Every structure is written in C-alpha cells, then in structure tokens.
Amino acid sequence: MRFGTTFGVLAAVIVATAAVGTAVAGLRETVVAVKPAVVAVGTYEKMRRPAAVFLGTGFAVADGRHVVTNLHVLPGRLDEGKRETMGVFTGAGGNPEFRAALQVAGDEEHDLALLRIEGAPLRPLTVGDSGSVREGDRVAFTGFPIGMVLGFYPVTHAGIVSSVTPIAIPRSDARQLEPAVLARLQSPYDVFQLDATAYPGNSGSPLYDPETGVVWGVLNMVFVKETKEHVLDRPSAISYAIPARHVRELLRGAGLLPER
C-alpha cells in the first residue's frame, strides 16, 4: 500500500536481498548500504489524518521478511473498528510503502520484538557477535529520531561506545528502588552506553559497525532509561543500546538462526 498525500512527492527506492555485513570503504558507503534495511514502525489507518503514525524504528534481519524493534515501540492496542493496522514503512522520501506486520516473537526482559512483514523481502542486516564490542569502539545508528516531524528520511548519528555498563545499579536509598529497578537487578545484564545523542523515535534503530554495517545492538530510549537514569531530574543526552547477542537469541528461538 502506497500513499503520497502525507509526505508529498514520490521517491522510489530499489533494494536488493543480500545481507549487509561485508567490509566497505567507510561510514558514507555503509550508510548507503544500511538505509534500505531500516524501517519506521507504526500504524496505518486510511481515514485518519495523518494516516501514518510512526512509533519507532526497526531493521530487517534474516530472510528480509522479518524486522527487529523494541517491544515498547509496538502499539498497546489497535482500533480494529477503524481498521487500524500495525506495520512498517519502507522506502524513502515522499511516498513510503506500508507493509502490514505481525509480531511473531518477543523478549520482554530485553525489550525486543520480532515482526514478520508482508511483501517482498528487504535487504537484511547481519546481526553480529556483540561480545567483541569494547569501550572506545566507533559506532553508528540510523533511524527516525523524532518520528514523522522530519518526514520519511532516516537520520544517521555516529559516536563511540563510552561504557559497557549494567542496565541497573543498586541505589543507596531504598526509596529509589522502584519496581522496574528491582526487576532489572534480579536479572542483571550489560548494555552499551553511547556518547551519541538519540531521541525516542530512535528506539529500535540498529547500532552498527561504521565500516561493515554489522549490527552490534539495538537503540533503546525508554526501557533502559527508566532504570538507569530514573533518578535524574531532567533527561540526559546519554543513549543506550541493547547488545546484539540478545537479538541473536531471539532469532535463534524463532528458528531464523541455527542452534549453537
């Protein structure tokens, strides 16, 4: 389904089905290779204005018919009476293509969701071994930082992994131990802290190697911050990503990666 009244002039993008993951010259070339895999995740309702609503970002994996995003990005409920549909928006520019999507797997502990999309496969990204990521590594991520405000034009940010840090840390004051913090402390794991600024619409964006496009993590702007920085009076410019090893486990559980 294609629509043009919301975004303006038609822009067609042809995508291949080969996975991104081989070495290229640099970030400029990597961004070109990565962008066809990056989608906006949201809902579509024909009679609504605007008909399309972006809720976050996602990226194609495996066979190109599956998309990874954050679980918190998905809509809580759909207005079935008005035929509101969850899906992804692909392409670029003035006339993105809407693909209906169905959630086929989820990982609540790591805030990850796997969607299966309709239509032809997209060019998938390679999900790498995030265990090799170290502090100081250069990274990039591409997504839709403030939803529809900037139109359907994916935006890329670059920086470094500034810290590999626990998702939650014990508090000196018991009054700070809210339920979300307690839950994370019971099942602790590390996340990547980044020096690059991200925004809520970046949730679900792929964090990747700027030279190869291999995915090292998934940007997360809500799930991590509610435990890592909930005591701050104002939001900080610090960004976080869920390591890709949890994405690999999600794909393995869905039969999209071979067992170890």
Image: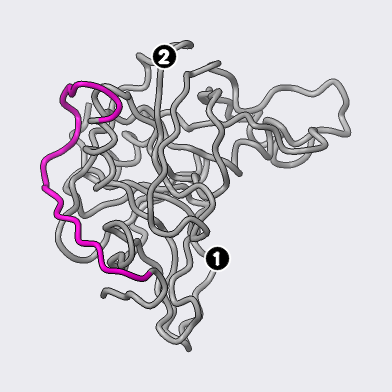
Residue 49 relative to residue 20: left or right? right
User: What residue type is disc 1 on?
Assistant: Gly
Residue 61 relative to residue 199: left or right? left
- Reply yes or no: does residue 88 show up in magenta: no
Depth check, front residue: 74 or 55: 55
Measured as percent of width and height from the top left, residue 146 is found at 54, 52
Q: In which quarter of the image is the C terminus?
A: top left
* Residue drawn at the location 60% of the way across and 22% of the way down: 166
Label 2's element? loop
* Cα gap from disc 1 to disc 2, whole angstroms: 36 Å
Name the mark on residue 119.
Answer: none
Q: Tell me if residue 93 comes above or below residue 202 in the rendering.
A: below
Query: Badge 2 is on which residue?
Result: 137
* Residue drawn at the location 62% of the way across and 29% of the way down: 238
Depth check, front residue: 87 or 52: 52
Among all residues in the image, which is located at the extreme front? 9
User: What residue type is disc 2 on?
Assistant: Asp
- Reply yes or no: does residue 12 show up in magenta: yes
Task: Give the extent of the magenta segment.
Answer: 8-28
Query: Badge 1 is on which residue?
Result: 76
